[in-house]
Every structure is written in C-alpha cells, then in structure tokens.
C-alpha cells in the first residue's frame, strides 16, 4: 500500500503463529544461546519453569506476521527504526502468537517516499500481551 493509503489509528490484525520447542531451540542456538532458551533442565529450575523464546525471536515472529499481512507489499523501501521495545511476558513453546499493527504516524518526507510508523503489539493465545514496539519504515507515495 502506498503511504497515503494508510490512515492514523488504522489497525491491522495478523494471522497466528504457533511457537514450537524446535523453533525456540533452533533460533536460540544460533542467535541467543542463553540457558533459558536452550538448556531445558536449567531453565526448568529457573524463574520461567522451562525454556522460553528469545526476545529477539519474538521480535522476528512479530515482524514476520506483520509483513505477511501484505500491507507493505512492494511499496516498502526499507525499515528505518524500531523504538520502545518491551518484552512483557515470556513466550513458551506451544504459545500461539498474533499481532496487531496500529498506524501511529504518517510523515511525507520526499515527493516519492515517506515514513510510516506502527505500534506492533503481540499477544499469546490467552490474550496476554507479550511484546510491544514501535516500528517505522520508508514507504513509497
């Protein structure tokens, strides 16, 4: 969608994504090899009572879900910033995540491009908010 197609306050809901234990382990082993993500025994004795997804993994899933809505389409040029990243609750294997993107800012920058900012909010199957962040991208006009 072109920049002018978006409106302030517009909300988009994504499909869902089920997080598997294999996903958590694979991602964490490569990108965030901390015990709470990869060592089931040690994680079970910790505050989360089992392994949890890396926050970076949660960001990646959220972004995947948002992109797969197709709202950017071929009109996206590049991401420009991500701010106010908050991990509210842990994401566990078996959780089913869905995200919402609310348009919070539309800013024309050039004749051909502008910045679209959305607040991404991710929930699990219990409707518990697990993640939130502001995301901005350069979009064609």
Image: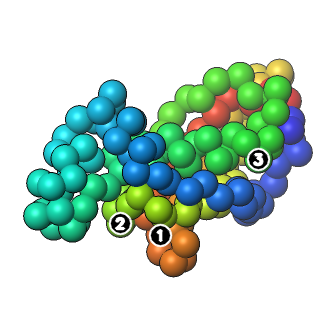
Local SS, label 3: loop
Local SS, label 1: strand
Write the residue at 60% across / 54% down.
17
Mark 3 = which residue?
69
Labelled disc at residue 89:
2
Q: How many marks?
A: 3
Mark earlier in primary sequence (3, 2): 3
116 displayed left or right of 18: right
Q: Label 1 to label 2, Cα distance in Å?
A: 7 Å
44 displayed left or right of 84: left
Neighbourhood count class around disc 2 (C-alpha, 10 Å): few under 14, some 14–19, many 20 upward: some
Quarter of the image holding residue 137? top right
Asked whether the viewer can see residue 84, the reply is no
Residue 72 in the image: above or below residue 95 = above
Write the residue at 33% across / 28% down.
30
101 displayed left or right of 35: right
Q: Nearer the viewer, residue 96 or 76?
A: 96
Task: State the quadrant of the N terminus.
Answer: top right
Asked whether the viewer can see residue 9, the reply is yes
54 displayed left or right of 138: left
Residue 87 in the image: above or below residue 127 = above
Labelled disc at residue 129:
1
Residue 62, image x and y in percent? Answer: 56, 49
Mark earlier in primary sequence (1, 3): 3
Q: Are marks 3 and 2 in contact (CB under 8 Å)?
A: no
Q: Are marks 1 and 2 in contact (CB under 8 Å)?
A: yes
Q: Nearer the viewer, residue 119 or 26?
A: 26
């Amino acid at each position: 969608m072109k920049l002018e197609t978006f409106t302030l306050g517009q909300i988009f809901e994504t499909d869902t994504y089920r997080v598997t234990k294999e996903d958590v382990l694979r991602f964490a082993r490569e990108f965030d090899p901390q015990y709470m993500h990869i060592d089931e025994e040690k994680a079970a004795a910790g505050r989360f009572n089992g392994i949890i997804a890396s926050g970076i993994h949660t960001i990646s899933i959220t972004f995947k879900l948002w992109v797969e809505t197709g709202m950017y389409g071929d009109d996206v040029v590049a991401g420009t910033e991500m701010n106010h990243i908050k991990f509210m609750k842990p994401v566990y294997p078996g959780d089913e995540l869905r995200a919402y993107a609310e348009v919070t800012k539309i800013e024309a920058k050039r004749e051909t491009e502008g910045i679209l900012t959305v607040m991404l909010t991710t929930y699990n199957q219990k409707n518990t908010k697990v993640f939130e962040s502001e995301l901005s991208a350069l979009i064609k006009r």
